[in-house]
Amino acid sequence: MRAAVRPATPSATSLSDRWRGCRDRLLASAAFQRWAAAFPLTRPIARKRAAELFDLCAGFVYSQTLAACVQLDLFETLRAGPSDVATLASRAAMSADAMTSLCEAASALQLLERRGAARYGLGPLGAALLGNPGIAAMIRHHAALYADLGDPVALLRGQDRERRLAHYWPYALDHSGATLTRDSVASYTALMAASQPMIADVVLAAYPLSGHRCLLDVGGGDGSFLAAAARQAPRLALKLFDLPEVAAIAQERLAKARLADRVTITPGSFYSDPLPIGADVISLIRVVHDHDDDAVAQLLAKARAALPDNGVLLLGEPMSEAASGADGVSAYFEIYLRAMGQGRPRSAARLRELLMAAGFSQVRQLRTRIPMIAGVIVAKS
Ligand SMILES: CC(C)=CCC/C(C)=C/CC/C(C)=C/C=C/C(C)=C/C=C/C=C(C)/C=C/C=C(C)/C=C/C=C(C)/C=C/CC(C)(C)O
Ligand SMILES: C[S@@+](CC[C@H](N)C(=O)[O-])C[C@H]1O[C@@H](n2cnc3c(N)ncnc32)[C@H](O)[C@@H]1O
């Protein structure tokens, strides 16, 4: 008979489980909730928790209120100044009553602000949104994710469904890129270009490129990140690698920006092709989180092979566990990438492991101005 082995002292995990068990039983008790809401010292916490839970229940209504404002161009319309409900309603082809409901809901969410009887202007969040046209583009494309999320359990089970988001990012369905057309890559490439300025600001402030000779941007889209890097470092030579149909868009966009003589564009797929050599820094901006671990391991190995000794890999993307207050970003990308059909949001610690496994050294996470927008890691080849 095996003797029951009991640890002399409970392990840290079992202590923490026990404490959390007590906490959960207390919080789940309706009687405790009633008491906490009534007792003056716990009342503010009870109210805060209740409001947090309400926000989770109602979040989709908030998002759709925002989506309606963006679809109706309300923020752009109010950029010039406040307007009366009748004018807004007639522009939007709806009744004044319906427009009042939208404006009241948007005001409660700080997107708009009531400025007198039946008159509304921008609210602090609506005004901040105007400072960044990429956000409105993101909100518009959420229609595809919202449709996929109609049945969230079916999405998680991978059961038959329309998969609108996966079709929005067709490289998730075709790793070679062979079946992609100009039309099928145009909308995601435009979305990435529209949101690239806020990413480039954060990444290039954390890691200025002026000390480098040549930058290769892998998965570089239409070249918007390269164009921002070129402005920061006027002597930097530029290279871009992306799927053929996207590379063609980059060629045109960079020619229009008068950067054609500074840039070399190589079409290809990093699933099947090597990366071009010659750069002393390679960037992967919002690329790694799109792919599963095996593919990332291969991609990082290819990047290392393409760099000289002491070359630099610059990785920029939203990271999980990035900062307190940014937990929503992890939740968002967990579900977003599940709907897309591949990839994972990763913590800086997990990315470090993948980089070390690919042979990189001196892996450093850099501070960024707004970690919610992007984290940055650099590593040496
Ligand atoms: C002047 C007065 C009165 C007061 C001053 C007070 C003060 C300092 C106020 C601050 C004002 C200010 C400067 C506000 C700035 C606000 C900013 C910078 C807001 C930024 C918001 C960014 C948002 C909401 C970003 C959203 C990003 C999304 C949804 C990204 C989605 C990304 C996707 C889907 C990527 C897909 C790529 C893939 C496929 C995963 O690879
Ligand atoms: C999410 S976008 C990011 C674009 C750009 N780096 C940015 O941040 O705006 C991912 C990019 O990776 C490219 N990509 C996806 N799969 C690829 C592959 N197998 N080979 C090369 N590029 C690929 C896409 O075409 C797209 O331009």
Image (cartoon, rainbow, N blue to C red):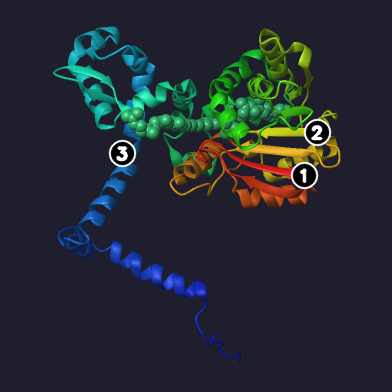
What amino acid type is highlighted by mark number 1? Lys
Give residue 168's quadrant in the image.
top right
- Disc nearest the viewer among 2 and 3: 2
Residue bearing mark 3? 58
Q: Would residue 100 be seen by someone viewing this image from the given angle?
A: yes
Q: Under tag 3, what secondary structure?
A: helix
What amino acid type is highlighted by mark number 2? Asp
The image shows residue 259 at horizontal and vertical percentages of 72, 13
Give residue 217's quadrant in the image.
top right
Taking the image as shown, residue 87 lies to the left or right of residue 6, namely left
Give the residue displayed 50% in from the left and 47% down from the top: 323
Q: Would residue 175 be seen by someone viewing this image from the given angle?
A: no
Q: Quadrant of ligand 1?
A: top left
- Figure quadrant of the C terminus: top right
Determine if the C-beta at disc 1 is less than 8 A from ligand 2: no
The image shows residue 109 at horizontal and vertical percentages of 29, 32
Q: CA distance from mark 1 to mark 2?
A: 10 Å
- Figure quadrant of the N terminus: bottom right
